[in-house]
C-alpha cells in the first residue's frame, strides 16, 4: 500500500511539473509581430516600424524623400518575457487573418497610415489602416504596439 501511495505522489509531481507553463515557454519563436506608421507627404523620418520576435524588439526609422539627410536608423531592445507572451497571446492569428487587408482610407489627404502584420511560420497577414485609428477586435494589441514603438523615441 505504501509503495502505491508513493508511486501516486511521484506521478502527480512529475505530471504537474510537465504541465506547468512559464511565460518564457509561452513566447513562441515562430510568431513575428510587425507594426508601423508611414506618411506620404513628409520631411524627415516618414516610416517607423517595429518587429517583435520573442523577447527582441527591432525598431527602424527611415526617410523616403531624403535618405542622405536622414539615414536609416535601427535600434534593438529586449522586452520582458511576460510582455512578449502577452503580445503573442493578443495576436490571435486565425482571427486576425479574417480582417480585411485595408481598413478605411490609409494616408488619404496625408493623414498617415498604420499597419499591423502577424506572421506565424510562413503564413502572414497585414492589415493597413488610417493612422491613429485601430483594428476592430484588436484594439488592445494596436495600443500596446504603439507603446512599444514609442519606447524607441531615443533611437538615433
Image (cartoon, helix red, strand yellow):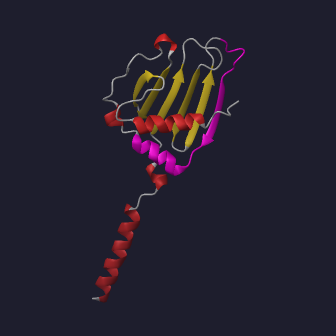
Count of residue discs = 0
Q: At x 37% / y 22%, what residue is drawn?
A: 101
Q: Position of residue 75 (x, y in %)?
A: 65, 34
Q: Is residue 4 magenta?
A: no
Q: Position of residue 144 (x, y in %)?
A: 49, 39
Residue ranking furthest to the left: 1
Q: Position of residue 76 (x, y in %)?
A: 63, 37
User: The magenta stretch spans which residues?
Assistant: 66-90
Is 84 drawn above or below residue 68 in the view shown?
A: below
Q: At x 55% / y 32%, what residue is drawn?
A: 50
Q: Quadrant of residue 2?
A: bottom left
* Quadrant location of the N terminus in the rendered image: bottom left
**77 on left or right of 32:** right
Q: At x 33% / y 30%, what residue is drawn?
A: 97
Residue ranking furthest to the bottom: 1
**109 on left or right of 125:** right
Is 88 drawn above or below residue 19 in the view shown?
A: above
Q: At x 45% / y 47%, what residue is drawn?
A: 86
Q: Is residue 69 magenta?
A: yes
64 or 12: nearer the viewer: 64
The answer to whether residue 28 is seen in the rendering is: no
Q: Position of residue 133 (x, y in %)?
A: 44, 26
Is 2 drawn above or below residue 10 in the view shown?
A: below
Is 140 drawn above or below residue 133 in the view shown?
A: below
The answer to whether residue 79 is seen in the rendering is: yes
Q: Quadrant of residue 14?
A: bottom left
* Quadrant location of the C terminus in the rendered image: top right
Amino acid at each position: 500500500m505504501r509503495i502505491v501511495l508513493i508511486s501516486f505522489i511521484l506521478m502527480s509531481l512529475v505530471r504537474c511539473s510537465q504541465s506547468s507553463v512559464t511565460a518564457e515557454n509561452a513566447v513562441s519563436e515562430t510568431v513575428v509581430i510587425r507594426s508601423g506608421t508611414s506618411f506620404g507627404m513628409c520631411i524627415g523620418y516618414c516610416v517607423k516600424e517595429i518587429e517583435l520576435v520573442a523577447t527582441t524588439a527591432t525598431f527602424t526609422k527611415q526617410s523616403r524623400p531624403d535618405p542622405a539627410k536622414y539615414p536609416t536608423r535601427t535600434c534593438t531592445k529586449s522586452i520582458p518575457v511576460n510582455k512578449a507572451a502577452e503580445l503573442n497571446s493578443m495576436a490571435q492569428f486565425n482571427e486576425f487573418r479574417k480582417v480585411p487587408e485595408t481598413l478605411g482610407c490609409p494616408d488619404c489627404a496625408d493623414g498617415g497610415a498604420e499597419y499591423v502584420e502577424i506572421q506565424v511560420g510562413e503564413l502572414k497577414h497585414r492589415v493597413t489602416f488610417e493612422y491613429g485609428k485601430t483594428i476592430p477586435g484588436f484594439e488592445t494589441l494596436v495600443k500596446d504596439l504603439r507603446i512599444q514603438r514609442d519606447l524607441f523615441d531615443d533611437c538615433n
